[in-house]
């Protein structure tokens, strides 16, 4: 999907698709409007606001719930092929369960979907982008395997309500964050810290919920709706700090424990969790006195159901780490870090974005795409998020523009390498509620004024640059839209 034109410049094929993304809790607001139930993010921000750096919440956020028509017009202005957004589970099932379906919630998403289609923009829908009904957290959340059934109940209503018009479904956004951050390290709601335990229990439930949803689509919907169902995984690139065997192994373990954890059961030819994960966690669990591995195991039937249960590899990528072996004395036991045994840090000399974890390493995306190509037999990859944060929200956002230009150039080179990348999504359409960082870190192509009740949006320079790339199919690092200052080289 890439070709050379104008001498040696690579360009995007006309079939290559561009879009932008958001997530329900980060943009919608209307947290208790029209019958919506409470989510774990409503609950955390309202009861323990000290978890959020600026004490803020998503009660209003960008107020996108009330701005469908004008936001779709902005998507038209950008010239995107699709819009990736997520559905709020408690807006559809206020109790968390299928006993009552909130028609106002269905109506809201129908309105958004119809408005997009009326403007020739494809809806790409994430079913779960982190806003679990609080009621389901109170019975344990994702570590409780009963959530498989509850998620499939929810997915069934989404397919039957929207599947006549929605043809691209993502079951889960970033299982590693849903499981590790929420239940092992406490970086996301509900902020539990059962390190080495909670995240692994969650991963069993989440993977089975995904596979059962894929099975449901195949059995009841695929013939009539003809859509595609997949999953989106987050993946940083990790490379060894030295040529030593230990560091090389640490970097590979980091990839297997962070990417392979969810990718191997679905995309590998053998299925199941990666062997190195099963072996290391079983070994460490035994040393620690546990009666069995802290990592749950799948039955043969479950392994088979999971294998091949995604029509594409959704990839969220932002950054790269340099990995070395974790010194034994620094390992907290049990923990996921001790389990993989890697210490992954900022690559020396790299630029840092407005988020302390976001190091700019453009070739990392090319290396990662090639790793996925060889590891999983070249699946179709849809990049479902990539983007850069700052804190000032400057409209002349040259650092973000440079990030997009350089990362997209490396996507073109990965395609030249033979990687089957078909789709690119910028995170994010607009500045929004950045989870524990509140409104302090901004990823938007559009600036949002959160001090104004009307939440006005203003295109940043990067919005015009992204639009120009979509239109021209090439990366022109000298392009300066009217009314903006030229970026320093
Ligand atoms: C994503 N990493 O999370 C989320 O999907 C978005 O909701 C969020 O706003 C955005 O990134 C920015 O933080 C990430 O491993 C998950 O580097 C993992 C990584 C980065 C971001």
Image: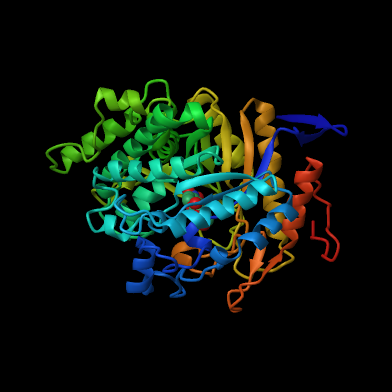
Q: Is residue 343 above or below residue 351?
A: above
Q: From the viewer's perspective, tell me whether residue 108 is left or right of residue 67.
A: left
- Residue drawn at x 22%, y 34% is 282
147 lies left or right of 114: left
> Where's the C terminus, which quadrant?
bottom right
Q: How is the image coloured?
A: rainbow
**Residue occupying the point 24% across, 59% down:** 138
**Nearer to the camera, 170 or 109:** 109
- From the viewer's perspective, is residue 297 above or below residue 161? above
Q: Position of residue 340 (x, y in %)?
A: 34, 40
Quadrant for residue 11, please give it.
top right
Residue 287 placement (x, y as % from top left): 17, 40
Q: Quadrant of residue 40?
A: bottom left
Viewer-nearest residue: 427 or 348: 427
- Of 31 and 443, nearer the camera is 31
Viewed as shown, does residue 23 lie left or right of 47? right
Decide if residue 177 is on the left or right side of residue 365.
left
Identify whether 263 is placed above or below 196.
above
Which residue is painted at 60% across and 49% down in the image? Answer: 114
Which of the 4 quarters of the picture holds residue 91?
A: bottom left
């Amino acid at each position: 999907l890439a070709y050379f034109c104008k001498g040696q410049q690579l360009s995007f094929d006309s079939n290559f698709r561009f879009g932008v993304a958001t997530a329900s809790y980060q943009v919608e607001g209307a947290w208790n409007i029209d019958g919506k139930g409470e989510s774990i993010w409503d609950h955390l921000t309202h009861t323990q606001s000290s978890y959020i750096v600026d004490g803020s919440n998503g009660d209003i956020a960008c107020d996108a719930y009330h701005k469908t028509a004008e936001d779709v017009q902005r998507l038209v202005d950008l010239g995107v092929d699709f819009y990736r957004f997520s559905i709020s589970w408690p807006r559809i099932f206020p109790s968390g369960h299928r006993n009552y379906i909130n028609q106002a919630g269905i109506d809201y998403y129908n309105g958004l979907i119809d408005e997009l289609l009326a403007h020739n923009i494809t809806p790409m829908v994430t079913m779960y982008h982190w806003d679990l009904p609080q009621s389901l957290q109170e019975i344990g959340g994702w570590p409780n395997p009963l959530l498989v059934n509850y998620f499939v109940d929810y997915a069934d209503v989404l397919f039957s309500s929207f599947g006549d018009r929605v043809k691209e479904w993502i079951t889960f956004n970033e299982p590693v964050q849903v499981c590790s951050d929420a239940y092992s390290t406490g970086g996301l709601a509900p902020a539990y810290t059962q390190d080495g335990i909670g995240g692994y229990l969650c991963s069993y439930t989440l993977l089975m919920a995904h596979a059962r949803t894929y099975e449901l689509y195949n059995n009841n919907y695929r013939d009539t709706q003809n859509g595609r169902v997949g999953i989106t995984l987050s993946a940083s690139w990790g490379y060894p700090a030295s040529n030593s065997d230990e560091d090389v192994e640490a970097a590979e373990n980091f990839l297997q424990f962070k990417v392979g954890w969810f990718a191997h059961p679905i995309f590998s030819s053998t299925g199941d969790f990666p062997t190195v994960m099963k072996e290391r966690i079983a070994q460490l669990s035994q040393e620690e006195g546990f009666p069995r591995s802290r990592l749950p195991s799948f039955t043969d039937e479950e392994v088979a159901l999971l294998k091949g249960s995604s029509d594409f590899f959704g990839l969220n990528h932002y950054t790269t780490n340099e990995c070395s072996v974790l010194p034994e004395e620094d390992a907290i036991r049990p923990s996921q870090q001790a389990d993989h045994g890697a210490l992954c840090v900022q690559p020396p000399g790299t630029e840092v974005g407005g988020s302390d974890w976001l190091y700019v390493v453009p070739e990392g995306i090319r290396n990662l795409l090639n790793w996925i190509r060889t590891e999983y037999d070249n699946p179709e990859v849809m990049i479902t998020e990539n983007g850069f944060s700052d804190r000032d929200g400057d409209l002349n956002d040259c650092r973000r523009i440079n990030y997009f230009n350089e990362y997209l150039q490396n996507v073109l080179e990965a395609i030249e390498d033979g990687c089957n990348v078909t789709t690119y999504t910028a995170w994010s359409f607009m500045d929004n509620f950045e989870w524990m960082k509140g409104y302090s870190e901004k990823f938007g192509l559009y600036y949002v004024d959160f001090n104004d009740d009307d939440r006005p949006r203003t295109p940043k320079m990067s919005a015009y640059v992204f639009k120009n790339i979509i239109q021209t199919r090439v990366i022109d690092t000298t392009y300066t839209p009217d009314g903006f200052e030229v970026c320093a080289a």
